């Protein structure tokens, strides 16, 4: 039986630190499209779905997706785990790949490595990083998580903590031996190398600088980006003061 692997990209307009960021310009296209284009280069993913919210702010996201032939799903604003579960169910996913829309330097090759590790290890969950307080060997912004639909459904049924519902997959790895977990690590440790994700204006400026140096190359890898930073280490100072959230941080606007 052929398995259906669906990459679900989460994103919304109501970001607390950079509102509307997913439709802001990045080298001539909205950041949303840049992430979708990168995810679509994956060789192990059958379908790419953009999962936004039912908040009226995200009407613009749905409209953009419709105008640009991007499959769009709308679900819960605060309960992102429910949004993922309902999207995975709607698109009949056997394997779910989680991507976030603030990672336009995402590497489709790393996505494929993570999916392959998931398949070959027989794990319930695989990733190329775990968020703080866990260790990682790839820079922030290359993040890819993969799980079985069955594992996602169990998390959806059982998880009650706010951070589990908002960050989708911590329930699958935060307690040892609850699920079988596999982690993709690089041969060298670049886990503290820098922030390649977009949460703030400084992050966006950095990524714009990187895209300018890539000069329209559509199939760049994370090693191409690494080479840019090794040639121009001063670029990292643009967002060096930005603090990265941990998996236990939740959006306080949703708390009653």
Image (cartoon, rainbow, N blue to C red):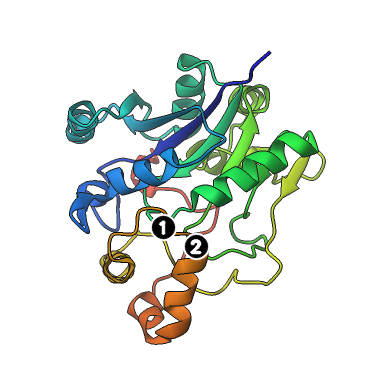
Q: Which mark is residue 51?
A: none
Please state which of residues 123 and 18 is positioned toward the viewer in this rendering.
123
Read off the residue under disc 1: 105
Establish if 3 lies above or below 251.
Answer: above
Establish if 135 lies above or below 88.
Answer: below
* Comes first in the chain, label 2 or label 1: 1
- The structure residue drawn at horizontal position 30% and vertical position 40%, both measured from the top left corner, is 12
Q: Position of residue 101 (x, y in %)?
A: 37, 46
Q: Position of residue 174 (x, y in %)?
A: 69, 46
Read off the residue under disc 2: 222
Residue, far right:
177
Q: Position of residue 82 (x, y in %)?
A: 48, 26
Tell me if mark 1 has few (under 14), some (14-19) or many (20+) residues whose alpha carbon lies within 10 angstroms of its own. many
Q: Quadrant of residue 170?
A: top right
Do callouts 2 and 1 mark residues in contact (Cβ within 8 Å)?
Answer: yes
- The structure residue drawn at horizontal position 35% and vertical position 59%, both measured from the top left corner, is 198
Is 38 on the left-hand or right-hand side of 144? Answer: left
Establish if 221 lies above or below 170.
Answer: below
Instruction: Tell me the element at label 1.
Output: loop
């Amino acid at each position: 039986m052929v398995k259906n692997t669906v990459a679900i990209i989460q994103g919304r307009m109501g970001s607390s630190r950079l509102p509307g960021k997913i439709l802001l310009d990045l080298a001539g296209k909205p950041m949303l499209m840049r992430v979708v284009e990168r995810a679509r280069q994956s060789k192990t993913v059958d379908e790419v779905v953009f999962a936004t919210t039912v908040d009226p702010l995200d009407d613009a996201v749905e409209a953009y997706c419709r105008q640009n032939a991007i499959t769009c799903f709308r679900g819960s604003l605060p309960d992102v785990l429910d949004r993922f579960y309902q999207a995975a169910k709607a698109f009949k996913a056997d394997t779910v790949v989680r991507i976030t829309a603030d990672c336009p330097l995402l590497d489709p090759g790393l996505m494929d490595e993570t999916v392959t590790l998931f398949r070959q290890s027989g794990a319930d969950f695989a990733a190329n990083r775990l968020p703080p307080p866990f260790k990682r060997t790839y820079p922030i912004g290359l993040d890819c998580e993969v799980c079985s639909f069955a594992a996602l459904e169990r998390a959806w049924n059982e998880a009650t903590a706010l951070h589990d519902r908002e960050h989708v997959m911590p329930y699958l790895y935060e307690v040892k031996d609850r699920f079988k977990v596999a982690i993709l690590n690089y041969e060298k440790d670049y886990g503290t190398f820098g922030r390649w994700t977009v949460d703030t204006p400084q992050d966006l400026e950095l990524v714009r600088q990187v895209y300018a140096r890539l000069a329209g190359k559509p199939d760049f890898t994370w090693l191409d980006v690494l080479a840019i930073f090794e040639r121009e280490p001063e670029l990292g100072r643009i967002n060096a003061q930005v603090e990265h959230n941990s998996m236990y941080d939740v959006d306080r606007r949703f708390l009653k």
